[in-house]
Amino acid sequence: MELRSGRRLRRSPPPPPHGAPSRRRLGGGADLISALPDEMLLLVLVRLRCVRTAVQSSLLSRRWRDLWTGLTDLTFRYIDPATIGAVLARLAAASTPVSKLGVHLQTRETAYDANLLLRAAARLSPRELVFTLWSSYMGDLEDMIELPCFNCTTSIKLDTQRFRVRVAAGEFTSLERLSLSGNIDFGALLHRCQVLRELSVTDMDSRQLSLPPTTEFLSLEKLSLNGNIVNLGTMLRQCPRLRVLSATFRGVEPCSIEAALLTLEGAVALGLVVSLLGIHIDRGGYNVDANRFASLLRAAARLSPQDVVVTHEIYGHVTVDLPCFHHATSIMMDLHYNISFTVLPNSEFSALEMLSLSGKCRVLDIGTLVTCCPRLRTLKATVAGNIIVHSALLQELDIDRDIDTGCRGIDIVTPVLKQLQLKVRAGGDIGVSISAPAIEKVWWQRWYTGLPLVFGCWWLERMSIETIERSHVDSWEDSCSQMQQLPRFHVLCLQLYSSNYLDAQLDFAQEMEKLPVTNFSLLELNFESYSHVYGALVLHLLRMRRIRATTKRLKVVLPCWPKGRSQACLGNCFCYKPENWSCQSAFCTRLEEVEIHDFEGRDHEHDFLKLIFRCSPKLKRMTVRLACTFKGCTTKLHNIFLAHPSVNCYGDFR
């Protein structure tokens, strides 16, 4: 027996035979979880990843009371500072060793709150400390946070955003990893970290780093700098054991960036590894012409960085050569420049796995570039000209073809490709060949130039196909039982306009064969012209083998005039052809659901409804949403619904 919700009604288990022990008695009625040792119960509390919830577990039973005080991994997220201070004081009184302490304060907290909590944290001496204060409190600009000395802490991550930070007296004798972000006197802090091996500084201002020339950091092996970096050479000389460097230049003049890159070349020759090189040029009044930009790229390539990130917010138009980054595994360029890479390197990007050239950055010969990247897994680029991609290892491909240049062909051969995103504007004569047998997700946008005629008076502006994940399906789509079982499905969308002045007939069946996938479940038709008869066109599409064989759901979106306005179609319009379309039929054996938006109740629209019911023997659901300008008769629509009792019909009469 099934309930209305669809769940099956289950019978209660039969009672045990007379004399047999009951199920409750077999377990003894004991709380088996509470019987576990403290070590295992603490693991349960750790998995909660919330100190507040762990403290509330004391309400479960006496066994759980104060058990949370044995936690060694504590994270406080957006909790009142007074509550955090009370918990830290309780742990300090119990002499609980803390391995990791994380404190993330809300935006309304002040420097006073931060100071109290930092002093309480220092009394616990955690092995690892994470402290963030992203405050929006606009108090006295002289408000200062004091960082107390953490004697036993080996790792500190401190992010104080706009607050000034000073360092209290004492030595950080055990500190090996330090990550800083904010207005901090780095020099004063680094003097007290003699065993520091890893240093990361974000939002750096070079004026904050004032080190005596005789100071050396003999233990520093890994350095990450992000911000206004101008004295990089001095820093390198003071770190004789530095092995890995990550440098991201922000707010620095291009000539100073290039000078810093030249300084790095000597260190790279001696074995320094540049793990990340970031160059961010904003609109700071810098004059960056083609020669300067090309020189920056060549200087960056000579450092053999592993990851490269270049952003450019200065507008212009240049043509440059793309240098070869032999050891780079990832290259990302987001450029507002109209930059065209005309000449590609003769050698290979032998380690490159991810390449992203976005913004207004264009590649003239994408086929040759892909050939130079034998290990490429992810590619995102804007292409000028034909799209040719042949790759044996490529798994993600995102191509946006530049609309200002002609494209005569698309040739993609990627046997292991899983995700494809392609945006193209071209005529109907473009040749398309896509071989991607392992593809899972698709987002294809195809804009047509001119007015390509599809049928009657309707011309096609855009055809797209998209893969919809199960988690993104709306409630209406959930009603289809077969689509509900699919983890993902494909949607074919057509955007159509009407006109009596059209170009040559478009071979729409041939256009369908050009799609990267053809097993779409949903057909969506968006009509952008008012008051025209659309039934003949929909019938023409449903008769096509490719659409008829796969479509389970049809969605028709009609244009809606604002209230008080209307427009009548001319009697000699081609949209009426053929005049007997409502008497014809198509055998749509897979169609299960139909949804119509902005239904106005005209006679030809009622004829279209009857046609759909007649041609769809397996139809399960029909939904009609009325337009704000509806002038028809709801009784007529209701009678059409009543004539088909096997179909769940819904009308939105708002």
Image: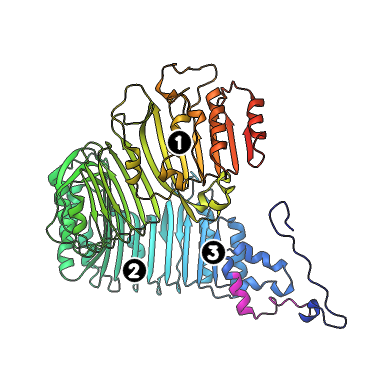
Residue at 60% of width from left, 22% of height from top? 632
Whether 491 is drawn above or below 224: the answer is above
- Counting residues from the start of the chain, the first of labels 1 and 3 encountered is 3
Q: Is residue 392 visible?
A: yes
Q: Amino acid at mark 3?
A: Thr
Q: Are marks 2 and 1 in contact (CB under 8 Å)?
A: no
Secondary element at image label 3: strand
Residue 198, numbered circle: 2
Question: Within 10 angstroms of label 2, few (less than 14), some, or many (20 or more) residues?
Answer: some
| In the foreground, 192 or 412 | 412
Q: Which residue is mark 1?
A: 525
Which badge, 2 or 3, comes first in the chain's sequence? 3
In 3D space, how far apart are the residues under numbered discs 1 and 3 (Cα atoms)? 51 Å
What residue lies at 21% left-to-right and 51% top-to-bottom? 366
The image quadrant where one finds the C terminus is: top right
Residue 220 in picture, x, y percent from top left:
30, 71
Looking at the image, residue 616 sits to the left or right of residue 328; the answer is right
Q: Which mark is residue 75?
A: 3
Above or below — where is 327 with respect to 463? below
Q: In this view, which residue lies farthest toward the right?
A: 18
Q: Is residue 387 left or right of residue 526?
A: left
Specify the amino acid type for callout 2. Answer: Glu
Q: Position of residue 356 (x, y in %)?
A: 28, 52
Where does the magenta region start and end? 28-45
Answer whether labels 2 and 3 touch (C-beta < 8 Å): no
Toward the viewer: 558 or 37?
558
Residue 349 shown in magenta: no
Q: Tell me the crowding category of disc 3: few under 14, some 14 to 19, or many 20 or more residues within 10 angstroms, Cα based.
A: some
Which residue sits at x=45%, y=47%?
549
In-front residue for pair 292/644: 644
Q: Nearer the viewer, residue 551 or 144?
A: 551
Horizontal and vertical percent position of residue 589: 52, 46
